[in-house]
Image (tube, rainbow, N blue to C red):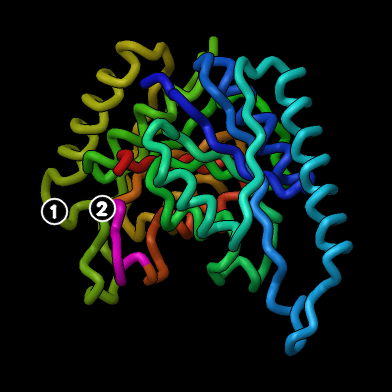
Amino acid sequence: MRFRKILCPIDFSAGSRNAMLTAVRIAKAHACELIVAHAWTLSSTAVAGEILYPAELVKQIVDDNDRRLESAAEEARALGAPRVTAKMIDGEPWAMLVEYAEADPTIDLIVLGTHGRTAIARVFLGSVAEMVVRHAPCSVLVVPHECKPAPFERILCSTDFSDSSRLALSLALDLEPVASRAVTLLHVIEPPRVYAGEIGADVHTGLGASSQKLLAGWGREAIASHPATVASFVRIGRPGTQVLAMLGEDNAFDLIAVGSRGRTGFRRMLLGSVAERVVRQAGRPVLVARARR
């Protein structure tokens, strides 16, 4: 597909600048509009009883944010983004960014950076990036702060043969043209959660072979319009664990693509999805594909 608009939230950190450089690269490939947005609000810690920040200080903060946002937009234009819009959004960052994307149905992709928290802080949700991934009405590309912008030449796509997985593979290949590209398809056969013992590859006769056959078909279909080499693997275990294990075995992947089932309401507040776990721990860009709702 061709993107119409890309939304790139920035907080003026090094991580968000890396995300913006990635967004510029994709916007150039699709000749589409890039919206560089900054969302901010005074935190509750800024208020003590009825005593608020002085109006003069708030104005200084607003003026400084406006100046830095316009500077970022100018950089995006200088780097070749065909159409750049700077947008200041007032309110809780993740909620207002999601609301903004919901209000504009032509926004096809959100590209945003992370602050690169590690260790125990990574196991909790709540960051802007993770909340946007969870609630966004469209696909989201998360760029870790430590990743230097570079073309996506080696893609790992985790698939469960759902429509969202098919979309993830298609979007990953559509992001940008790459002369030499390799795609690895991974399908994980997940044992029943009540099963506590070891499970062998022959747990179901022919299940692995059937999965390999399906993967091969998906690969042939994908590269018919996007030249690439394709490899496919079938593993047994938990999907998130196996995706991360493959990253540990092969550090050369520069993009991970996963589908989102687009759960809504109360179920969206639950932790543990494959997409969220991979976003937390992959340490490289992750595309979470979601059909625009």
Please indicate, yes or no, whether residue 153 appears anywhere in the rendered image.
yes
Residue at 61%, 66% in the rendered image: 122
Residue at 46%, 44% in the rendered image: 101
Instruction: Tell me the mark number nearer the camera, choosing from 1 and 2.
Output: 2
Looking at the image, tell me whether mark 1 or mark 2 is earlier in sequence order: 2
Q: Quarter of the image containing the N terminus?
A: top left
The reply to whether the C-beta atoms of the residues labelled 1 and 2 are less than 8 Å apart is: yes
Q: Which residue is mark 1?
A: 204
Q: Which residue is mark 2?
A: 189
Please indicate, yes or no, whether residue 258 appears anywhere in the rendered image.
no
| Quadrant hosting residue 19 | top right
Type of amino acid under label 2: Ile
Residue at 67%, 68% in the rendered image: 119
Percent across and percent down for residue 153 are: 55, 23
| Quadrant hosting residue 152 | top right
Q: Quarter of the image containing the C terminus?
A: top left
The relative height of residue 232 versus residue 83 in the rendered view (above or below) is: below
Magenta-highlighted residues: 262-268
Residue at 48%, 59% in the rendered image: 277
Percent across and percent down for residue 184 are: 42, 32
| Quadrant hosting residue 291 | top left
Q: Which mark is residue 239?
A: none
**How far apart are the two marked residues, 1 and 2, measured between alpha carbons?**
10 Å
Q: Secondary structure at mark 1?
A: loop
The relative height of residue 105 versus residue 48 in the rendered view (above or below) is: above
Drawn side of residue 216 relative to residue 259, left or right: left
Label 2: how many residues lie within 10 Å, few (<14), some (14-19) or many (20+)?
some
Percent across and percent down for residue 262 are: 30, 52
Label 1: how many residues lie within 10 Å, few (<14), some (14-19) or many (20+)?
few
Judge whether residue 264 is colored magenta. yes
Judge whether residue 72 is colored magenta. no
